[in-house]
Amino acid sequence: VCIHRVRSCSSIRFIKSKYVCVFDKSALKFSHQQRLFRTSAVSCGQIVQFKLSDIGEGITEVTVKEWYIKEGDSVSQFDSICEVQSDKASVTITSRYDGIIRKLHYSIDDIAFVGKPLVDIEIDASKGVASEEDVVETPPMSHEEHTHQEIKGHKTLATPAVRRLAMENNIKLSEVVGTGKDNRILKEDILNYLAKQTGAILPPSPKAEIVPPQRKAEAVPAAPKDKARKIPVPVSRPIAFAGKDRTEPVTGFQKAMVKTMSAALKIPHFGYSDEIDLTQLVQLREELKPLAEIRGVKLSFMPFFIKAASLGLLQYPILNASLDENCQNVTFKASHNIGVAMDTEQGLIVPNVKNVQSLGSAGQLGTSDLTGGTFTLSNIGTIGGTYAKPVILPPEVAIGALGKIQVLPRFNSKGEVFKAQIMNVSWSADHRIIDGATMARFSNLWKSYLENPALMLLDLK
Amino acid sequence: MVLRSLKNCLWLSCVLRTPKACFWSTASGGLIIQSVSNDVYQNLAVEDWIHDHMDLEKQQVLFLWRNSPAVVIGRHQNPWQECNLRLLRQKNIKLARRRSGGGTVYHDLGNINLTFFTTRKKYERMENLKLVVRALKALRPQLDVHVTDRYDILLDRQYKISGTAAKLGRTSAYHHCTLLCNADKLVLSSVLKSPFKGLKSNATPSVPAVVKNLFEEDPSLTSEMLLDAIAKEYAVQHQIDHHVTLINPADETLLPGISDKTKELQTWEWVYGKTPKFSISTSFNMVYKDSVLDVKVNMDVKHGRIEVCNIDLPEHWLPPGLYTELVKSLTGSKFCPNETTALVTTLPRVCPQDDELHNRWSLLCENMIRLM
């Protein structure tokens, strides 16, 4: 096999000798440049027809279901090329070569034939070709110690390009930890290893340091009695090779948010913040929690905030209003549909209190729960933070953002320091129809309900 | 049958053998493992992990697993076409897409899963299924079970009790199949019936079959007994000890990278986004005030996202600006009820606040969402 390959390599070399020299040296020193060389050199490589290999069980044809690459992409040996299906079996076809995809012989849903060409790959002449019998790992190209390493009884996986890079830098593949598929050693792994040797600042993968190189059929020995064993934390690859920018279109819900927020910021906002002492409320909630649990309800602070807001809006109805487009009319909404801003998978949604008790997942909310809000509270404190500058959600005219509850020292009426449960609230309101005084008075009223929960009972109708 | 816990096995093998050979390399040609988890995503992730990381040259693996209620579609299938998604969501039944081909199955604890891992060269589905049949006959000789050339196992020559699918990679392969012991047939038939009309696609269609539980044939049978019988037969076949090693699919130490695999299987992009391109041509009736409107909808969906969207409404039923806005927003958006709900409830914020308009909008959008 070795001799066969040398022969085929040398014949290729003979034809393309002058180009081989260019690739051999400079390309291999800088891995990212190597790719550039490859993709820009159009006519230098040889086009090889990669045939669909035997699937087994006497199958002669398959349906192409998905392409993982497209024409012009560069591939490495063992990269996935496509997914084909035959009689309930889904097969991943991987590349035998390093090179550039020049032609796809089939489209999705076409029938592909075993033994017939699947893709055309332009291979880099100097890299060499894998043997025809390839269904399992290809044997390495030479018998030199660098390129044919046995680590703990298993062959190392590395493409010919990677092996050459290791050889050029006098690196033993056995000392490099592979982070690719099947623990394959990638160019990045060689370069990381190099960087470590020279003391360059690259965050080493904890996996490499703590856990012995993992090969197939070998898991981390879990010795429960060994305290020194550390648990490897799966970490992404070193930041040095982060990759390129990624552009995605703005679609669906994001588009709607773009429109909403653009409209929102046309509203002249003003802010007003205050500090609320929730010590009494916290105590009340602790008392009520077990009773609520018996009823199967998880009691949070939200119901208190909403009730207090509703009572406040009775006194200051302008905060529950809506200004028309031309700023000609203000509509005072009768119903207090107080929305609670929620962060979900889709993004920000604001179900309003018609059905706030059935909040569990956004999936259970219908369109009627999510429309018709007149006033919004945002409990950003559950994520963190104290102060905020919330944006009013049109067509509403006010919004409140609740910070997190912190235990802080405060002075009581006797001048003593006590532990207080403090939460900050940040209001924003539409300055075209709401003035600072109104907002301040509403906030004070809301604050008084929460600092003295008994007052809420007094004003209940 | 001896069930040994993972720790025991590991400790023993570390002590008795050389330090490097541990859990995954037993003395002879086979290993039988069973999952302690009933989470379909975790169990599918274990299959992926073994397929990607284990060297199956020296030993083959049998993996036994069961899931709490879930619908599992094949790699190249269309969930809208294969099952009743609304019912799944209502009943909190999970939806998963596996990496192997084939059709859709309903899993619950009464339906057991068997995965046979081999090298690509040793991939042989018929042999595996014959092993299962041998195991069943050894357990209950009177059972009339046989393997068809479609790789199904039939009971009494008419009822399907097992379906098969397979995945082939570069060096390894696996063949998995189900075995109906005592699954809830009522739920099975209702979730596997899609109410979708007007869907055109090249996705792999499932072939419906009449099924029966082995429990109905012989009420003394339980899932545990079946798992045990199959493990025993596998042990005989591979000349190994009849013991089953338990594994925890959440154990990142034993299966490094498993949590990433589990997460990937749950992403929308995998479950729905991998659906082959399809088109919808359907209609619904909207009752509004005193009239009934017939609305025709045509959509092309690619990668689970709406590529093209046409809603045939009577002219001016919605102001043209708003109609265009709706179509533009839906285009490129996920074909997903949650996403669409979030979208259609946010858009009206920047429209004239007109109750009539909002009612029409809600009515139309609710019907659109119901399609998804």
Image (tube, coloured by chain):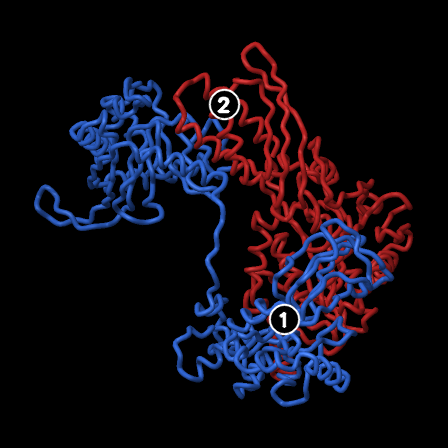
A259 and A103: which one is in front?
A103
**Which chain does the residue under circle 2 lie in?**
B
Residue at the bottom extreme, as displayed: A144
Q: Residues within 10 Å of mark 2 (few under 14, many from 20)?
A: few
Helix, strand or loop at label 2? It is helix
CA gap between label 2 and label 1 equals: 56 Å
Q: Quadrant of the N terminus of chain A?
A: bottom right
Helix, strand or loop at label 1? It is helix
Task: Tell me the tag on residue A182.
Answer: 1
Please say whether residue B321 is visible from this viewpoint.
yes
A220 and B362: which one is in front?
B362
Residue type, label 1: Asp
| Left or right position of A312 against B362 | left
Q: Are marks 2 and 1 in contact (CB under 8 Å)?
A: no
Q: Residue at x 85, y 59 (%)?
A: A60
Residue type, label 2: Pro
Q: Quadrant of the C terminus of chain A?
A: top left
Relative vertical location of residue B299 with respect to residue B144 in this rendering, above or below: above
B204 and A345: which one is in front?
B204
Q: Residues within 10 Å of mark 1 (few under 14, many from 20)?
A: some
**Which chain does the residue under circle 1 lie in?**
A
| Left or right position of B68 against A301 | right
Give coordinates of residue B252: x percent, y percent: 55, 65
Give coordinates of residue A118: x percent, y percent: 75, 61
* Colour given to chain B in the rendered image: red
Give residue B16's quadrant in the image: bottom right
Give coordinates of residue A279: x percent, y percent: 23, 42
Residue labelled with disc 2: B320
Q: Residue at x 33, y 23 (%)?
A: A325
Relative vertical location of residue A394 with respect to residue A416 in this rendering, above or below: above
Please say whether residue B177 is visible from this viewpoint.
no
* Colour given to chain A in the rendered image: blue
